[in-house]
């Protein structure tokens, strides 16, 4: 099977970031590596996590994001990063970036694994990562900065200060995509690039009808679409990313769509490995994606969720069915004349 492209370090005391505005709201971004007693207090508050149904969730802007942030979820995020590396054949990005880029923003950085890998590849660039959860490591490359911040609030960075903005796996996190992309546009330098990547909430099969092969899996994605839409942060956003980027004013927009096998059924050795890892990531991710939405939004009993997810997990692991999900990557450029 081949991919299916379509064009269509504990730090010293933190100094003030010269690229952040001196605004009253600037304290909304909390440096992971320290700072004032006020920031330390807020950071401590951000680590006062919420626990529910055996999982740990963020407390900063509590309830805004439905996936957990515990060790299991962090392991899953890192595994998905590895799977992307396999499927993307080692690419950390798709936009045609110049070698002399100086500043990069990773929205919703999670564990920060991509930001650190990118910083290693571009040692002269500063990579900024923000997230609602302070789960990033303390020892990082010297050109990486992590902050606790909410990308849906007004950004406190200096306008036109980034060469590249990345937003990956934000489906289910964002209520107002036009606002997010408007802020991204304003904070990119003219000629700078944005890149979005997400998975649609649909399952496909290369050798049959997924409705017949894996009805529980199909129903799982249907329930995710319904619950996340009712939560006002839809998960099923990937297929419209290309239109959203164009509507925000970006040009030279391109899209590439990859197949991510759900298990090790592919004859391609790299994708077979990806499928093997993806099976584990999916097994971990069912609870991450489903439990909070199904209990909080749809009103399911936690035991009901466990039973349902067990059936989904069993169907996903069956290698006789060539199940896969699509991974959409879209990138666009801010015009030089903007």
Image: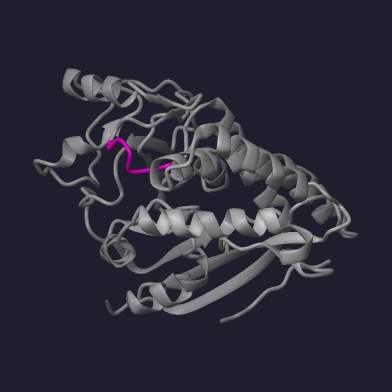
Residue 292 among magenta residues = no
Quarter placement of the N terminus: bottom right
Front residue of this view, candidates 282 and 336:
282
Question: Is residue 62 a member of the stretch shown in magenta?
Answer: yes
Q: What stretch is highlighted in magenta?
A: 61-66
Quarter-wise, where is residue 76 in the image?
top right
Image point (45%, 40%), residue name: 295
Q: In this view, does 63 lie to the left or right of 212?
A: left
| Rendering coords of residue 280 (x, y %) | 72, 39
Q: Which of 177 and 125 is in front in this view?
A: 177
Percent of width and height locating residue 170 = 44, 53
Q: In this view, does 120 lie to the left or right of 167?
A: right
- In which quadrant is the C terminus drawn? bottom left
Looking at this rendering, what residue extends furthest in the left direction? 24
The residue lying at 39 percent from left, 51 percent from top is 173
Q: Which colour scheme is used?
A: one colour
- In the image, taking residue 69 as reference, residue 179 lies left or right, namely left
Q: Is residue 185 visible?
A: yes
Residue at 52% in and 55% down:
223
Question: Where, by quadrant of the figure, is residue 60 drawn?
Answer: top left
Towards the viewer: 224 or 161: 224
- Left or right: where does residue 267 sit relative to residue 101? right
Q: How many marks?
A: 0
For the stretch drawn in magenta, what is the main secondary structure? Answer: loop
Work out whether residue 96 can be spotted.
no
Residue 192, how many percent across, how many down? 39, 66
Picture residue at 27% right of the left edge, 22% below the top: 45
Q: Position of residue 43 (x, y in %)?
A: 28, 24
Toward the viewer: 210 or 137? Answer: 210
């Amino acid at each position: 099977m081949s991919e299916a492209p379509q064009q269509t370090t504990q730090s010293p005391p933190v100094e003030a970031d010269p690229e952040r505005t001196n605004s009253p709201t600037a304290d909304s971004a909390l440096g992971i590596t320290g700072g004032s007693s006020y920031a330390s207090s807020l950071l401590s508050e951000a680590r006062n996590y919420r626990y529910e149904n055996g999982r740990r969730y963020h407390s900063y802007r509590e309830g805004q994001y439905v996936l957990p942030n515990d060790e299991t979820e962090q392991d899953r995020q890192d595994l998905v990063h590895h799977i992307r590396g396999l499927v993307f054949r080692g690419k950390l990005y798709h936009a045609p970036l110049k070698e002399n880029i100086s500043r990069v923003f990773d929205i919703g950085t999670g564990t920060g694994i991509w930001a650190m890998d990118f910083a290693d590849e571009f040692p002269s660039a500063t990579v900024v990562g923000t997230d609602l959860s302070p789960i990033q490591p303390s020892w990082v490359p010297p050109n990486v900065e992590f902050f606790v911040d909410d990308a849906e609030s007004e950004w406190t960075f200096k306008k036109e200060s980034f060469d590249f903005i990345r937003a990956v796996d934000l489906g289910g996190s964002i209520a107002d995509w036009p606002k997010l992309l408007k802020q991204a546009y304003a904070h990119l330098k003219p000629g700078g690039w944005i890149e979005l990547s997400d998975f649609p909430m649909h399952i496909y099969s290369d050798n049959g009808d997924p409705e017949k092969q894996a009805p529980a899996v199909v129903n799982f994605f249907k329930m995710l679409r319904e619950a996340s839409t009712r939560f006002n942060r839809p998960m099923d956003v990937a297929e419209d990313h290309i239109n959203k980027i164009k509507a925000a004013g970006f040009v030279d927009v391109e899209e590439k769509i990859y197949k991510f096998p759900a298990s090790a059924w592919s004859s391609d050795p790299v994708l077979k490995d990806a499928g093997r890892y993806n099976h584990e990531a999916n097994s971990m991710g069912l609870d991450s994606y489903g439990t909070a939405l199904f209990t909080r939004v749809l009103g399911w009993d936690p035991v009901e969720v466990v039973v349902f997810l067990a059936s989904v997990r069993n169907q996903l692991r069956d290698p006789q069915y060539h199940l896969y999900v699509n991974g959409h990557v879209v990138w666009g450029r801010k015009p030089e004349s903007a």
